[in-house]
Amino acid sequence: MANENLQERQETVAPAIELVGISKAFGPVQANKDISLSVARGSIHGIVGENGAGKSTLMSILYGFYKADAGEVFIGGVKTRIPDSSAAIAAGIGMVHQHFKLVENFTVLENVILGMEDGGLLKPSLAKARKLLKELSDEYELSVDPDALVENLSVGHQQRVEILKALYRQADILILDEPTGVLTPAEADHLFRILVGLRDQGKTIILITHKLREIMEVTDTVSVMRRGEMTATVKTKDTSPEQLAELMVGRKVLLQIDKKPATPGAPILEIENLQVVDDKGVERVKGVSLEVRAGEILGIAGVSGNGQTELLEVLGGYQKATGIIRVNGEEIDLTGKYSDGQSRRHRGIAHVPEDRQSEGLIMDFMAWENAIFGYHNEPAYNKNALMMDNLAIRAETEAKMERFDVRPPNPKLEAKNFSGGNQQKIVLAREIERNPDLLLVGQPTRGVDIGAIEFIHQQIVELRDQGKAILLVSVELEEILSLSDRIIVMFDGHIMGERDPANTDEKELGMLMAGMETDGGAA
Amino acid sequence: MDKMPKWADVVLIPLISLCLALIVSGFVVLAIGEDPIRAISIMVNGALSSTNKIGYTLYYATNYMFTGLAVAVAFHARMFNIGGEGQAAISGVGVAVVLLAFDWPHWTIALPFAILGGGLFGAIWAAIPAYLQARRDSHIVITTIMFNYIAAAMMGFLLNGILKNPNSQVAESVNFPAGAHLPTIHEMLAPLGIGFSKSAPANVSFLLALFCAWLVWFLLWRTRLGYAIRAFGHSPHAASYAGISAFKITMIAMIISGALAGMLSINVVMGEQERLIQFFVEGAGFVGIAVALMGRNHPIGIILAALLFGMLAQGGFELQFEYPEISKEMVLVIQGTIILFTGALDYMVRKPVEKIFARLREGQS
Amino acid sequence: MDFAHAFLQIIIAMDMTIRLSVVLLFACLAGLYSERAGIFDIGLEGKLLISAFFSASFSYETGNVWLGLLAGVGASMVFALIHGIASITYRGNQLIAGVALNFLASGLTIVIGLAWFKEGGQSPALPQSSRFHELTLPFADTLRDIPLFGPLYADVISGQKPLVYIAFLLIPFTWWLLFRTRFGLRLRAVGENPASVDTAGVSVIRYRYAAVMIAGVLCGLGGAYLATSQASAFGREMSSGRGFIALAALIFAKWRPWYALMSCLLFGFLEAVSNLYPNIDVFGIFEIPVQFTQALPYILTVVILAGFVGKAVAPRAGGEPYVKER
């Protein structure tokens, strides 16, 4: 009896989740550093942070995907070990992943009961789930047609299925990872009403997001993560978006780049009302218009997944879109025969893609083969209609590797055997030395060591000074701030605003990246 | 860094897989109460001990080079062409149609046209599944399997119909004109004063196979088309970044693959049978899979693996003859285990070797 | 041609269709379990063949056809296990593993058969006790005289061998298992989106192995039917491509049990027609050659695969080894 009382008391007093001293490293990268967090029962707790701040790692530890190197997890005051996802489910934790884990050609009911069936036959479980769905839809606006196939549902409804799945598993703690990334504003509002309803029924909700509006709107408490550390945990009503943005981005150490003021010339790239719908039917770019002039660097800031990737893909020729794009005043093909990478290169567009390992390079190809990737049809690299001039390519690559200080300067080494920085230099050398009119650069220094960062930045600025137009996409604010001549912030598929780097700071940009209007106005 | 040196990947792993396959096959021989050592020595002897036997070994190896190259080219474009069997069969029709159309005066004139005919027919038979894959998203493995059977039915239809020799009891065409006769190795070496068995079927097609191997190497590593094929094969996503068309690569790679498989009928139909018969491919299309796997999809590896499989095939016949307790189908068991170890169980073989090299490297540093 | 004669022809064709469909049904269902769980199986042919051999051999040696059946199923399951180890545990290429099994079956059956029976790779003809026999259903003889239904019942439905009834009963059973039980739900989920099963805390590997082993059992039954019911001895390469027709039937059936019944009956019927009427004369205008009838299953499958008539969509995770996402 005494024991039971103790437990009861613990349940009323103890926080729903308590993390103590969680650390996790991936090789040399410390993804989580000594993180402690306590979330009260019946509250909505937000976690904000930039890309790579360690939010997802922390939640993966909580859901049993990763094992923490150090630290302890308490659920309802009881120390709990979570080696895998079934342990997390047993501990009452439900997770709504960013990429849904649904079986598309199953019905809603089938998805809900999967893995939690009572007994060998489906009938009783299906009936039970149907009843629960009915109750929940009345209670929380969680209405979904239980017999619809998931593939026929809208993304918002699919997300509700994920929530229903967690509730069917009797989750008391619900983790949502960037839940509004794929939702329309109306769907997002609906989701928040559901979350508030659930909270009022005593559920604990952890909301991972980079959108400050959401944090301010629905959370009770909020934690900020930066570079693997938890920098603050505050009550939402005691804070402001400005404060959170500052905590999130921190004081950026501006990289010193020798940079003359830009002397912009004629517009090289003009984009009017660009729209991109991805193959899942989600609208990724929602009417973007912009312009890049010769001799300037336009930086696009934003948390990843807000449409920048698709924008680059459209310009690079491997994503269809609607709208108008002009390069050097001539309109380019966005859907037809000439909307491919080769045609774009003929137009004088060079592209350093965001993901050098899966796009910019063939990892099993040698450096010299990679050094002409995309330009392999150029006459300079071919002896005749048939044969490539391998010797010439190799010699040119060797010279390029020298100029770009690629180490080791061995053109016969396969791309996978170079460090990240040197891989990036190979891509950069290839694209810059084409002497393009327009250079697209995505995440130029992701996974690149400090020494190489400086070098890469110098190369980009040099190209600008030769009068080329440069479109830079980066999630690193310091990079955007130190390189750009103008800054555009993208959020949720559209442009939040344009700023002059001289008249803005990371706090303001952080606000824009998180979807908050500021009164900065256009530069 | 690489997990192991290149030579280990290219030479050591296939050799270990081969040894494992031979050991497992040896156990099969033991299990039926026979002597594996005796069996293997008979096979080796049976494949190499006279110019006649070498002639047969080379004849089979020629077939396997063609089909192995066919599988490899498709593999480089990330496709599994399991339809070599059907492509080779249909190419026989192409060769026969060309050779029966004229009274060819000399093989040097007939051969280029036969190559064109056979290559074209084989290519068409591969191009249809390729098109269905590229445009209709039909799984190429399944369609090429289906096309093997459709090809078999087509052969039966043609050889019992318009191509049938009216004076023959079986389904076969009339003999090709004498001018289409390809020189055998015996005939090629005789002027040089080198003796070679007269009855061995190996013929000038062996040189054609070596030439094709060179051609494939040249295509893949010296031309920009080959560059695009390999880039697409390694990473279709990166290929789309570079503006390489998936449709074009799929079509071209399969057309080349089908044409290569079609060269088999130069060796068999034109070189050996000198008429079209019904089941002349005899599984060589499937053996090509084993050859390509064993040869690591590189022409040199494929030449070596084809020679090995040629020895196995010829050795198998001798085995049946000299050691009647063991059937020649023992060769299929060896081929099957080689495919298993080099193809499906690659990871199992590779992992321990990688570990050993990792440990060696640790020891050094 | 009078009516009675025509009717007799139809009865004969129907009877033959059923007999010829059984092997296809077993193999097709085997493929259905395997592919529904995300493992492509082009080794159906090899499993049929190895089972045919061992069931005939053991039936002959023991004089007990049921022991033969057991041996056939056992051999096929060993093959299935190899497929599973290669493609699930070691994440090898499922298709290549299947090709290897087909080679092994072709070789092993003849090598072992020759050593065992010394009859050039065949098994001896099976005596009565080593074969399955027709079951006569109740009232077959009394109902025979009823017009139309009588002969249909007596000669088509009744008088088949036990494995025939098992094969046909397996269709509703499979449907029930896949769509009405927990096992089936999870099995299908594993083939569509294994991550959904994994995040639900259920082992993907276990369900994939289960599916592959079921395929082994079913191919085992199919092979045993081939050697001890349809024929009465093992013969070289006696599966003669039925594993691949079954694969075609599976695609034609869009991976669904009831459709599988239809497609296997259709393909069995085409085989029966090509046996009974080699060349079909169409009103004296032209002749449909037997080869066309033989190739029709494959042609139909290609048409379906290409999506010209009702696109067949394979289980989405098919062919890919499952690697836990992180």
Image (cartoon, rainbow, N blue to C red):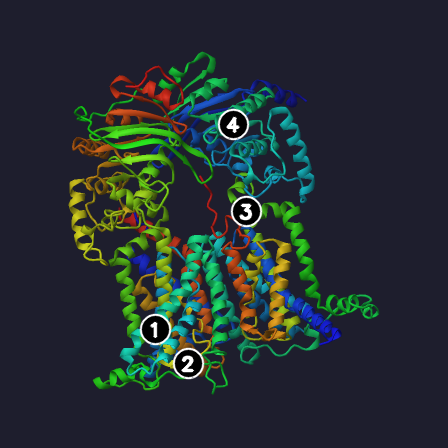
Q: Are marks 1 and 4 on the same chain?
A: no
Going from the N terminus, do you reach mark 1 or mark 2 first? 1
Amino acid, disc 3: Val
Alpha carbon distance from label 1 to label 4: 65 Å
Q: Nearer the viewer, residue A201 or A354?
A: A354
Q: Secondary structure at mark 4?
A: helix
Q: Where's residue A362, x and y in %? A: 31, 48
Q: Nearer the viewer, mark 1 or mark 2?
A: 1
Amino acid, disc 2: Glu
Q: Which residue is mark 2?
A: B318
Residue B350, image quadrant: bottom left
Q: Where's residue B181, x and y in %? A: 32, 82
Q: Which residue is mark 1?
A: B62
In this view of the protein, can residue C107 be seen by the observer?
no
Q: Secondary structure at mark 2?
A: helix
Alpha carbon distance from label 3 to label 4: 30 Å
